[in-house]
Amino acid sequence: MTIIQLSYIVAVDKYKNFGVAAQHCQITQPTLSMQIQKLEEELGVILFDRTEQPIKTTKIGATLLRQAKIILREVQSFSDLVSEEKDEARGEIKIGVIPTIAPYLMPLFLRDFMKANSELKVIVEELQTGQILQKLEEGSLDLGLLVTPIEREGLKTEPLFYEPFLAYVSEKSPLSKSNKVDQKDLNSGDLWLLTDGHCFREQSLLICKNRKKHSDQNKHLLFESASLETLKRMIDQETGFTLLPYLATLDIKNSKKLKEFNHPVPAREVSLIYNSYFRKNKIKESLIESIKEHLPPEMNTTVTKKVQVVDLPIGRNS
């Protein structure tokens, strides 16, 4: 049994296809098939049912695959520890970022972070919270930038900053007459939302607990989007309002549509999350330092009495 053979069976389990797995491993399909067959003969078990399409992992195969992934993670951790001792930031780092953070936070710091770690390859994926958690657990991501609190066994969290919510209000909305807004004045019936799966949607609904019978929003239009930018454009044309994270408002200059909240200001906790076996600590610390250095000066990195951190039930249950 070899580490290479374990990496091959993990690839087949992931892609459910010998040809695709071989391409991923950068070898020929006959070589991959031969090595897996040799491993099966050595173990005396069948790992994959080749009669199924896509290929199906057998019951005993699934059990052994779980252990194979643990072994491969530990091998990677061994290599990472060597780099840590040598004070090297080499290799690659894979970061998952949720869509309501990625377009607003990443441009602030990413270029300088990469300059400071010039020998490091950075791979960024924009994914929803559930996808990031799954990839962190299976080892296909190193770090996640997302909204917390999240309670997940085997994952560690380091809060980075607390990002205030603001209301983006149609000129036709009664809220447009106010300089600031109170949570109790927000009617969820007038709220434009992101689609299911976005944690920002769940937090917006928690903030807008007030449900009045009357709503000014177009009764004939039900519109949900995967993009905050799209929601802003819709409100420019329609009525109602949406909520925006602070970083998403930096390019909105002197707009009367943008309303701050009265204290305590609702805010979301943005954190770095990673698996407990993660060993690239110097890279992680460099990333945290770079993010905090490039935040707007008015952004809080600790909780204050003026801030009300909005819970994240989807994170706790996902």
Image (spheres, rainbow, N blue to C red):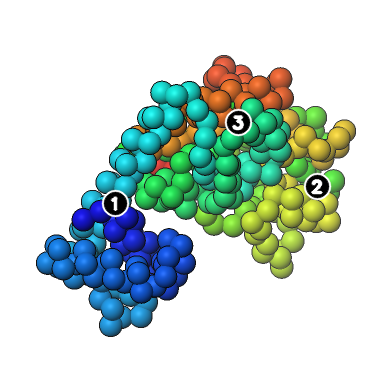
Q: Secondary structure at mark 3?
A: loop
Image position of 2 (left or right of 171): left
Q: Which residue is mark 3?
A: 117
Which is more foreground, mark 1 or mark 2?
1
Amino acid type, residue under disc 2 in the picture:
Ser
In the picture of the structure, the residue carrying the numbered disc 2 is: 170
Going from the N terminus, do you reach mark 3 or mark 2 first? Answer: 3
Most extreme residue toward the bottom is 51
Mark 1 or mark 2: name the one nearer the start of the chain. 1
Residue nearest the viewer, comparing 83 with 186: 83
Q: How far is disc 3 from disc 2 in space, using C-alphas?
A: 44 Å
On the question of residue 97 being in view, the answer is no
Quick one: SS at disc 1? Answer: helix
Q: Earlier in the sequence, mark 3 or mark 1?
A: 1
Alpha-carbon span between mark 1 and mark 2: 59 Å
Instruction: Using a 10 Å C-alpha cutoff, classify the residue at mark 3 as few (fewer than 14 neighbours), some (14 to 19) or many (20 or more).
Output: some
Between residue 270 and residue 36, name the one nearer to us.
36
**Label 3 – label 1 distance at C-alpha:** 29 Å
Q: Tell me the residue at 39%/29% (across/down).
A: 82
Tell me the amino acid under the disc marked 1: Ile
What residue sits right under mark 1 in the picture? 3
Q: Please tell me whether residue 111 is drawn above or below residue 215 in the rendered image.
A: above
Depth check, front residue: 184 or 201? 201
Check disc 3 and give the amino acid type.
Answer: Asn
User: Is disc 2 placed on a helix, strand or loop?
Assistant: loop
Residue at the left extreme of this rendering: 44
Residue 188 coordinates in the image, percent (x, y): 62, 48
Q: Residue at x 68, y 62 (%)?
A: 223
